[in-house]
Amino acid sequence: QSMPGTAFAMQIAQHCPLPPQGNSPPHTHLSAAEHRTSPSGRLKPSRALRVLTTCHLRASLLLPARQFDQNTTEPISFYLSSLEELLAWKPTSDDDFNVATMPLANREPPLHSKRPRTLVCHDMNYGYLEDRFIQGSASRDPYVFYHWQYIDIFVYFSHHSVTIPPVTWTNAAHRNGVSVLGTFITEQTCGGQLCEAFLAGEAAAYHAVAVQLSRIAHFYRFDGWLVNIENTLSKAAARNLPLFLRDLREQLHRDVPGGLVLWYDSVLPSGELKWQNELNEKNRVFFDACDGLFTNYNWKEEHLERMGAQAGERLADVYVGIDVFARGEVVGGGFETDKALRLIRKHGFSAAIFAPGWVYEHLGKENFLQNENRFWGLLAELLPTHSISTLPFSTCFCLGMGTGRFSAGQEEEVGPWYNLSAQEIQPLFTEQQAPGGAGNWLRTRCSLQDAWNGGSCLLIEGIIPPEAGHVAVRLFSFQLPAPPKLFLSLLYKLEEKLPEVAVALELTTWDSGSCRVGHKAALPGPATRHQPQPLPTSPPQLSGLLSGCGRQSAAGWMRRCYELELRDCTLHELSLILSRHQPGQQERRFSCRLGEIRVLDADSLRSSLPPGPSLQASQLLWHKGPGPDQLSLSLTLRWSYPHSQARCFRIHCQGRAGPRGRELPQLLGVAHATLYRVVGLAVPKAPPMESCRVEFFVEPVLNEGVAVDRSRWGQLVLVYSDPASTSTY
């Protein structure tokens, strides 16, 4: 019999008594009670946990193939392939893994300001590759996008009818303030049939589709749709198409404030499939019904010249397509994409950069990060940088991938991993030439060889020229009123083989005319640079958040902490200053790794933390093996915790050594939502007449980048004894 895990467990509990004491075999029992335990494991009134007791599990649990991988039961992202699937879609608790947890961050300038924007349309090998694994994968050399500060909109494109963006992409984009769109696409003969089914008839048919698409975006928490109809239509269907687009836009704006519906330049009001490569009278009806038009790629400058009059005040709503693969008669492409972008900006339009994964697919995985930085570096002057506009700000420069996983500077797992939900905000990457072009003298890039937390750090390499005393490296752009008191923290590590240099943070503020730092007025001028002195120890009120100020960790990471009192100032930039210890006439080469930067508003720091998560387990699956005296356990953990306070959760387990042994908690993985699927956990078989226990812990990591004390972890204890049979599939 197959049934949801929780219902199954509760049904067992109703028919089984409590486990007996002593060595007699316990009867099947499930309880979900709060107890208290000491560090030794004895129950006493001092710590919250959940105890789950099971044995003789006889039922098989089948998880839905849409949301779970059928080989491993890992949660996966998915698409819908047909109109029938779309209309039948209804969310259940099995969809919870696919709901984005990262809200769309504020940034400056905002999306809807009247300025040219930049859209990236991600199309890679039909989509849903390693990025479909919500909890990550062990992919080696995966594709990652991390130049979010340059773009406004991210479209996840595939050739499936309803392309729902994988939640990992939505989390990564939202952390950087970038809106995410899915794709509603119809193509070829089957696409035409789909369109006729909902467009050629009554308004109720296309209204139902509009409602479902809007509900999907709202439920999974992404920001809208690119609509791409690339097949011919009957006159009736073509006549209803603009009405459908208006309906979809109306539904989406109601369900997803700030959401977008964009139209791809394809079919015409006559029903003919004929790309225009511009906005004109033939496709303007679709532009008027949507929030913007994404043009086809085979345009010339004369197309841009004509479009100005058509767009009127909506220049920024025309996204001129650039195919980075340069297929057909296009301008630019590849490392010459800047040629197309320069023309687009010249005429004041937004740009839609299609398939920038060309860097990865065409040039290969080797040297991908170097080639990716080169590609976006060539476009940087044409892509205005967006600024961070909220605090707290914290980043450890993780790319959402790595060759190992680090925690507090120590490598705790060796092996490749990939999870874009773990990606953190990246800096402004720099590559500057020495005077006369004699090689690079300043370069910033991601490094996978070391990290403070996650899988990567920021590596800054360069030369302090003979005529200069220091080098300034611009890291982040800000645009927000400065709080009265600001705390800053920097973690860095210098290359031991090179002469030591001094490392410090520099904060730039815009002068509003009355900006004061401490008791001093800011210097006259539009911007003032501040280099505060590092604190010798952690401020008492921040001892839990900024521990180790002025000290070096065992792994060689040095933490510097700073305090600034500001009044009537606007935060503008954060830079790193590398300077000589002693004056000299020789160039000074340096190599510095940054592991973490934090910018914190002292007034908003919490004096108290929420209670530890309360855990529940469901969807339990037992299997034989992998060893002769082992079982394989899979289950879903759920808990409650304020989304606004936790960056992620580290999941640990303990007790896998068997009934007579105990070991330290082992890291199972990292969750970016308040649920986690434990998959294929090897646990010992319970000996005859005995029971075993395995404990699960959920460790919150706060938005400030800080882990909480173990007394505030969530805990669940699973007690089991000799299952008579295990489920197989």
Image (cartoon, helix red, strand yellow):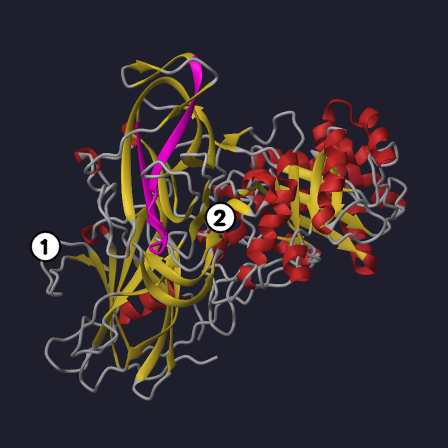
Residue 641 sits above or below residue 88 on the image:
above
Which residue is pictured at 69% across the width and 45% down the height? 353
- Report crowding for label 2: few under 14, some 14 to 19, many 20 or more residues within 10 A (C-alpha): many
Disc ID at residue 100: 2
Point out the residue furthest to the front here: 585
Of residues 566 and 355, the one drawn nearer to the viewer in this rendering: 566
Residue to which mark 1 is pinned? 45
Residue 343 image point, x, y percent: 77, 35
Does dot 1 land on a helix, a strand or a loop?
Answer: loop
Point out the residue furthest to the top here: 513
Whether residue 114 sits left or right of residue 590 in the image: it is right
Residue 254 image point, x, y percent: 59, 33
Which residue is pictured at 38% across the width and 61% down the height? 405
Of residues 643 and 391, the one drawn nearer to the viewer in this rendering: 391
Which residue type carries mark 2?
Ala
Who comes first in sequence, dot 1 or dot 2? 1
Which residue is pictured at 29% across the width and 56% down the height? 698
Asked if the stretch drawn in magenta spans residue 496, the answer is yes
Which residue is pictured at 36% across the width and 45% down the height? 596
Q: Give the range drawn in magenta.
A: 486-512
Between disc 1 and disc 2, the foreground one is: 2
Which residue type carries mark 1?
Pro
Residue 164 sits above or below residue 344 on the image:
below
What is the distance, in whole Å, between disc 1 and disc 2 at their CAs?
37 Å
**Main SS of residues in magenta:** strand
Residue 337 image point, x, y percent: 72, 45
